[in-house]
Amino acid sequence: MRFIALDKLINLEDGYRREFRIDFHRLLLLQHKGEHYLIEALCPHQEHPLLAATIDAAEISCPLHGYRFSLQSGAIVSETNALCRPLRVWPVAYEGSDVGVDWSESQ
């Protein structure tokens, strides 16, 4: 695994959201109520971007069909009748003043 820095900790504040691409993955780094989360940037249902999604009570809601996912685990909290897998999440890693992810080529 190698550490990939995504941003400086000083730049993060509540409401922070920024998308990153690592290999073929689109990731969304965000801060909500002082906590940092790193999730896949597209809803797994129909790949709608989550950059402008609503966040409430540590859950993110896809603006397209209303699927809600836990920011901590990626588990589906609310869904429609269509099948959907959980949201992928990665542990946030820190190195000095950088926030990022410990990345493996197998991810």
Image (cartoon, helix red, strand yellow):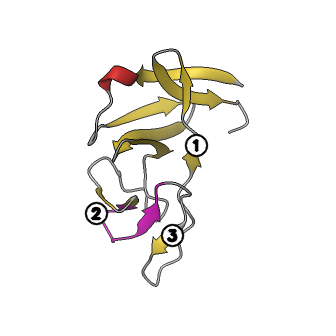
Q: According to the image, label 2 marks what residue?
A: 63
Q: Is residue 63 magenta?
A: yes
At x 43%, y 32%, the residue is 20
Q: Secondary structure at mark 1?
A: strand
- How far separated are the C-alphas under marks 3 and 2? 15 Å
Tell me if 71 is positioned left or right of 56 in this view. Answer: right
Quarter residue 56 falls in: bottom left
Q: Give the x, y percent position of residue 21.
A: 47, 31
At x 33%, y 71%, the residue is 65
Quarter residue 16 falls in: top left
Q: According to the image, label 3 marks what residue?
A: 76
Front residue of 42/28: it is 28
> What label sits on residue 90 in the rendered view?
1
Q: Give the x, y percent position of residue 98.
A: 47, 19
Question: Which residue is most to the bottom?
Answer: 81
Front residue of 10/19: it is 10
Question: Which residue is most to the top?
Answer: 96
